[in-house]
Image (cartoon, rainbow, N blue to C red):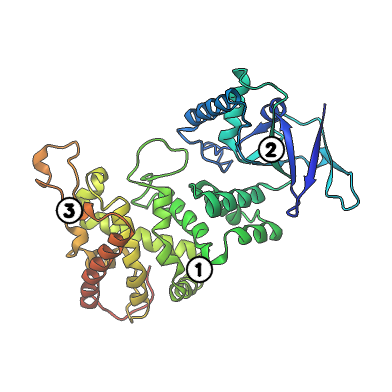
Amino acid sequence: MKLELLAKKNQDLSYSVSIRASDLVHHSFVDFYDDKTGQGYQRRETLRDRRGREIAQYIERCIKQNLPPRLFEMTANAREAKKVTFDPLDEKDRLGILYINNPTERFFSIIDGGTRLLGIQNALSQSIIDEETTFDVRLFVDLTVAEEVAQFLLINEKQKRVRTDLSLRLVQKLLDNGDLQDNEMHVLETVVPKTDSWRYEASRIAGLMNKHSDSPWNNLIQMPGDNSPKPVKLQAFFSSLKNVLTEPDLEKHFERVARKLEFNSKSEVIAQILRNYWNAVRSVNPKAHEEPNTNVLWGSIGVNASHIALSTILLSIFNSQDVDFTQDRFERILKDTMIADYPKWFTKPGTKDEKEYPGEKGEFPTMTGAANYVRLAKMLEDDVRIAIHADMHAGNVKI
């Protein structure tokens, strides 16, 4: 089997083509994330099926009104370059025929337009359109998965603003494994500049916090593909780490400690400090951790406030004579602060007798949104600074 597509070569080395509905449906797929294998980078949204039906209904309305459906250009990658050849028709090689020999059922990886593809599939199966109806595709050839992720981030971060935590997680995994080539990293950096690359590290740290046996967040962060409710989602957790990861002076301290104490990376240093901090939180406020759904300390509010406050608290400790980030130190610091005050974080009763809970919702559950996170962080920072000064002891770096 051979597909012959009239194609315009674009300046980004992609091709603009129109593909028959039957060929598009038969040979295209979406590289969804698989929780069992850890492969894939796109989220299988819960509303995908409904949106697919709505797109088919939209196509049907267009057909009845004798109007062309405006689904806009989808973006795809032909993953087998050896099967693709371009035969130019003009001297400047800008227009020609794109030949695809024996495409498989998983040949076109849909980078952008997976739900539109489902709508087209529905419309075709319901005979709303016929096999000859064509749809526009911007087709790349032989991109690596990392380069596909770069295109996905470019479209969804810079243009449409949809959740991209899965893609960031995959990139961090590739970085950790040393599987990114220099050219792939260069492509990714053109989409996610170094000023934003903290998100890769944040995604890795969140994963470490969720998996480590000594972490109080073990299995409490809702990872992609996990449908069971958890106190905080991956994207919320790693977004909360921005201040900790983008403070230049902190970065220098983390790198110095990683070398001095022989950690593999500064990410592991940060993850260890966070484990110590949150283990101390659990120790001084055990009721909150025992039933995290009853309070906001173990949700986005507590996570954001804590991590924003930590960005300045950690810097103060690094610049002091008592560079001690052990759990014991954090417990001493936190035991008389707002962190230990369960009623202030309380939001709703759990499974115990109602007498076990405060009578009414505390003041902190109302502090949602970025501005309130900063306000709460400042309160926590002021609370903790007093305790730090009372607990100062000169000594070596301890984590």
Q: Residue at x 42, y 48 (%)?
A: 234
Residue 172 placement, left or right of 338? right
Identify the amino acid type marked 3.
Tyr
N-terminal-most mark, 1 or 3: 1
User: Is the residue marked by circle 1 packed among few (<14), some (14-19), or many (20+) residues within 10 Å?
Assistant: few
Q: Are marks 2 and 1 in contact (CB under 8 Å)?
A: no
328 in relation to 346, above or below: below
- Mark seen at residue 342: 3
N-terminal-most mark, 2 or 1: 2
Question: Residue 131's quadrant in the figure?
Answer: top right
Residue at the spot of label 1: 262
Residue 388 placed where, x, y %?
Answer: 25, 74
Can the viewer see residue 212 in this picture? no
Instruction: Classify mark 1: helix, strand or loop.
Output: loop
Residue at the spot of label 2: 136
Identify the amino acid type marked 2.
Asp
Out of 158 and 211, give the one closest to the viewer: 158
